[in-house]
Image (cartoon, rainbow, N blue to C red):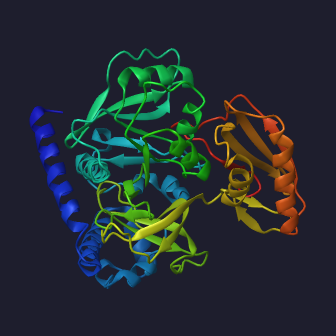
């Protein structure tokens, strides 16, 4: 990329970032007007230039001119990852030279990895949102900002900073090396701000992290469990901010200093919460998350089923920002146990039992855990020892979980296993629950 292009990209990113900082204080009506204008534009673009969407809209007997309000968006069918994989060539806008485009690949945590094409305007928009979030949460331009991301290897020689710019914030990207090596590298860099997965924070807590004192920690890619928050709270001086986003859209929501929920950035995407019938859920109810992004014109995603579940809320944040709130992200759609009766429960139900009844007083007892279900009447709970692990906990956990299942009127056998490591996905994520029954 030429120096001129870099300068233009940074200038435009800063321009959009300044708009975000102004937009967050506008009233809800003004934000909806801005959002709907962008929504109409991306829908028209997709209809006019993307073969797949032209066919989809035509089959549903709807055109861009018939989208007169947010409710009309429900007339457009949702799109799944399977739809995109099956129709990939037709998902790209006509006249676009695919060979000149960058792309991202999703982790495949739903079992379906996905390639997403993107261009400079998309990257610029995503970087603007990311930089805006950083500054709103207290990151300063001169901070040593470090992201731990993807899988590393002992064979990789890391000897200098790999830096990329997000507006006026520079980021050092460090591969996810084995924990001992990662600790030594972070001690060398001395980050002021750390951006990583929640499971990485839990793992680092088992090592001597002296000399690593980030002021701020951002998490992404995984749900922040109570276990993780407990660990961070006991690691002095750190403030944790949860963010929500994806490869397909970049950052979609973030937690501010009030920690009341996650603010949805409505001028970069439309986020809907729907039930099994496709109807919008009410405040306080869990719904499947459906996203329409405004940045990507080479491969737009309209009403895309991202594969996550979350709870919308009408509550207002004490910070005064007008961005609406997500009460919490509840994980992937397949992060549910299927009970013998056929009922489904979230892994959060089990996590609450494990954390509150077993590890609340000693968050360093385990560093990682994972629940695996291969049959309806049996689950395996895999645990990686923490620095203060007590073997007697295994039987306590087993009895507590089986007792909770009995209260639900279900009979499940719980098998606890101590393992050396929980396998990670390509990007470095670790899934908390794998239910082969749900899949």
**Quick check: can you spot residue 436?**
yes
Q: Position of residue 195 (x, y in %)?
A: 41, 40
| Quadrant of the drawing holding the C terminus | bottom right
Position of the N terminus, as image quadrant, is top left
- Give the residue at x 50% y 41%: 197
Dividing the picture into quarters, in which one does residue 238 lie?
top left
Q: State left or right for residue 409 relative to residue 158.
A: right
What residue sits 45% from the left and 28% below the top?
A: 175
For residue 191, above or below residue 405? above
The percent position of residue 403, horizontal first and vertical second, equals 87, 59
Can residue 79 be seen here?
no
From what the image shows, is residue 355 above or below residue 155? below
The percent position of residue 188, horizontal first and vertical second, equals 39, 20
- Taking the image as shown, residue 22 lies to the left or right of residue 228, namely left
The residue lying toward the viewer, choosing from 181 and 433, is 181
Residue 37 in percent (x, y) is at 24, 74
Task: Work out whether residue 160 or residue 68 is closer to the camera in this orientation and state it.
Answer: 160
Q: Is residue 339 left or right of residue 153?
A: right
Q: Residue at x 31, y 39 (%)?
A: 99
Left or right of 145? Residue 286 is right
């Amino acid at each position: 990329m030429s120096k001129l292009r870099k300068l233009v990209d940074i200038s435009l990113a800063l321009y959009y970032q300044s708009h975000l900082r102004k937009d967050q204080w506008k009233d809800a009506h003004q934000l909806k007007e801005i959002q709907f204008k962008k929504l109409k534009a991306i829908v028209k673009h997709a209809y006019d230039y993307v073969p797949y969407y032209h066919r989809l809209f035509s089959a549903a007997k709807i055109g861009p001119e018939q989208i007169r309000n947010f409710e009309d968006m429900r007339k457009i069918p949702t799109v799944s990852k399977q739809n995109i994989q099956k129709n990939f060539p037709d998902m790209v806008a006509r006249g676009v030279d695919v060979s000149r485009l960058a792309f991202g690949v999703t982790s495949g945590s739903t079992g379906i990895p996905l390639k997403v094409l993107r261009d400079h305007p998309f990257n610029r928009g995503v970087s603007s949102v990311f930089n805006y979030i950083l500054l709103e949460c207290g990151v300063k331009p001169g901070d040593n900002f470090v992201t731990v991301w993807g899988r590393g290897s002992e064979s990789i020689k890391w000897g200098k900073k790999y830096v990329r710019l997000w507006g006026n914030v520079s980021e050092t990207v460090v591969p996810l090396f084995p924990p001992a090596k990662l600790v030594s590298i972070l001690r060398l860099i001395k980050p002021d701000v750390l951006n990583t997965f929640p499971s990485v924070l839990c793992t680092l807590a088992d090592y001597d992290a002296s000399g690593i004192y980030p002021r701020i920690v951002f998490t992404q890619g995984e749900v922040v469990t109570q276990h993780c928050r407990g660990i961070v709270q006991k690691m002095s001086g750190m403030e944790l901010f949860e963010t929500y986003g994806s490869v397909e859209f970049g950052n979609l929501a973030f937690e501010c200093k009030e920690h009341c929920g996650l603010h949805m950035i409505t001028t970069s995407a439309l986020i809907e919460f729907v039930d099994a019938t496709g109807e919008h859920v009410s405040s306080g109810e869990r719904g499947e998350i459906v996203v329409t992004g405004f940045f990507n014109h080479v491969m737009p995603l309209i009403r895309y089923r991202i594969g996550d579940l979350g709870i919308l809320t009408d509550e207002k944040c004490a910070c005064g920002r007008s961005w609406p709130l997500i009460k919490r992200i509840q994980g992937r759609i397949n992060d549910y146990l299927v009970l013998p009766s056929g009922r489904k429960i979230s892994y959060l139900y089990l996590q609450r039992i494990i954390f509150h009844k077993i590890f609340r007083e000693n968050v360093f007892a385990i560093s990682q855990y994972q629940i695996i279900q291969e049959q309806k009447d049996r689950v395996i709970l895999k645990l990686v020892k923490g620095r203060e692990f007590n073997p007697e906990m295994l039987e306590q956990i087993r009895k507590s979980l089986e007792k909770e299942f009995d209260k639900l009127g279900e009979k499940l056998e719980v098998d606890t296993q101590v393992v050396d490591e929980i396998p990670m996905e390509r990007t470095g994520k670790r899934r908390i629950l794998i239910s082969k029954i749900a899949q």
